[in-house]
Image (spheres, rainbow, N blue to C red):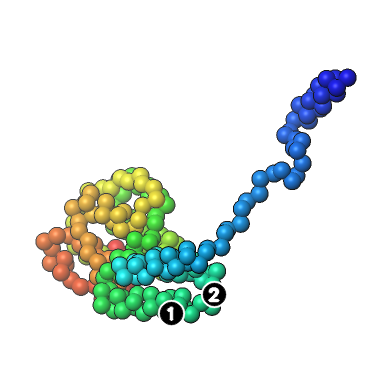
Amino acid sequence: MKTVLLMAASAVILLAGFPVDVCGEDNKSKPESARPLTDHELDEEYARAVVLLSAGQFDEAAKTVAAMRRQQPGEPRLIHLERKIQLAREEATREHPAASFQQRLSRIIIPAANFREAEARDIIQWLQVESADRAPDGKPVNFVWLVPSGVELPKVTLNLRQLPLLDLVRYVTMMTGLKYRLEPHALVIYQPDSAAATQPARQGDDVRPQ
């Protein structure tokens, strides 16, 4: 009799056409909540943040402190360290503006770049528009195009995914024989050995290829 009942129950489950939890809701796996860090682990994370700050890795240091402050929002040493990171970032920007600009570019990831036989200047113009959508601060990258008009450049074909903006610029300039340089507030594209190659970009310019 028991065998018959088990066979009948199995048939009902099969005919239903969908999985049945015969063990009940209580046995379903539930996501584990994040475990608070112990005092020892917090001390280790604090030391790690200090090392990152000393190495100039301000973004990583700030993320580490922010994670600890979620557990200890009013901890004085974390508030103090967070302020030190901000001051160090500002000082580095003043002393090495081009390096700060390069760090900003490294955080801009282009999901896809698909071009076939495209003009280099068209790709640069597209990157300037695309950068506003991808930049963490929502601001477009200021490109300055210093390639003399009338210069014929090789066409560019690209099919790339998840690439930092600066790497994409490297590909374009390498394929066309152009060069680029970073100024404090602009990414300058130029042709080597041309008179325009040494022309500086003015702060605040938003120059697109003509």
Helix, strand, or loop for circle 2?
Answer: loop
Numbered label attached to residue 80: 1
Residue located at (36% from left, 79% from top): 87
Q: Please state the horizontal and vertical placement of residue 143, each as a whole percent of the image.
A: 30, 66
The 10 Å Cα crowd at callout 2, few under 14, some 14 to 19, many 20 or more, is few
Q: Residue at x 39, y 50 (%)?
A: 162
Extreme residue toward the left, this view: 193
Residue at 14 percent across and 60 percent down: it is: 192
Q: Nearer the viewer, residue 163 or 188?
A: 163
Mark identifier at residue 16: none
On the image, the x and y values in percent for residue 149 come to 21, 61
30 lies above or below 186: above
Q: In this figure, which residue is indicated by the disc labeled 2?
A: 73
> Is residue 133 among the parts visible in the rendering?
yes
Q: Observer-nearest residue: 52 or 111?
A: 52
| The C terminus: image quadrant | bottom left
Q: In which quarter of the image is the N terminus?
A: top right
Q: Residues within 10 Å of mark 1 (few under 14, many from 20)?
A: few
Mark 1: amino acid: His
